[in-house]
Amino acid sequence: MLSDLQVNFLAKALVEVGGTTLRGTTAELREKLARLFSAAAPQSRVDSGPDVELVVDDRLAYSLPSFAKAVDLSVESIRQQIAKSYLVPSYLNSKPLIMREEGIRWLRSLPADRS
């Protein structure tokens, strides 16, 4: 089962493959991703408010603040994941960048349940 954050980030990653902007509600994108990746099973949904329209960009890499915003976490949380070597940045001079593929790999490595 993919979280809303994972759905959003994976949908952004698909722009590179398809070359077009993807639009849709979280539920619509989850369904499209499930068909493409066979990754999401039917799920019971906790109502966290109405689905929002997601607009996908075509970035190849993210600064730490941009990546944190994309996955709805704080920059400090991202830095902690890097410090623990769970998330591996690339560097341009001294600036850390999260490559799209690394961000997707990291998201897929996250547990599906609270533990």
Image (tube, rainbow, N blue to C red):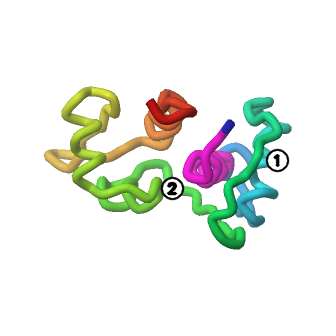
In which image quadrant can residue 52 be found?
bottom right
* Amino acid at pointer 1: Lys
Camera-side residue of 25 and 47: 47
Q: Is residue 41 left or right of residue 111?
A: right
Q: Main secondary structure of the magenta part?
A: helix
According to the image, label 2 marks what residue? 59
Q: Amino acid at mark 2?
A: Arg
Taking the spot 63% from the left edge, 64% from the top edge, the residue there is: 48
Foreground residue among 43 and 34: 43
Q: Is residue 88 above or below residue 18?
A: above
Residue 2 — which label?
none
Residue 22 belongs to magenta span: no
The residue that label 1 is drawn on is 32
Q: Position of residue 42 (x, y in %)?
A: 82, 39
Residue placed at 58% from the left, 46% from the top?
A: 6
- Give the image quarter of residue 68: bottom left
* Residue 42 horizontal side relative to residue 5, left or right: right
Quarter of the picture holding the C terminus:
top left
Q: Nearer the viewer, residue 42 or 24?
A: 42
25 vs 85, left or right, is right
Magenta span covers which residues? 2-14
Residue 81 found in image quarter:
top left
Tell me how far mark 1 sits from mark 2, CA to CA: 20 Å
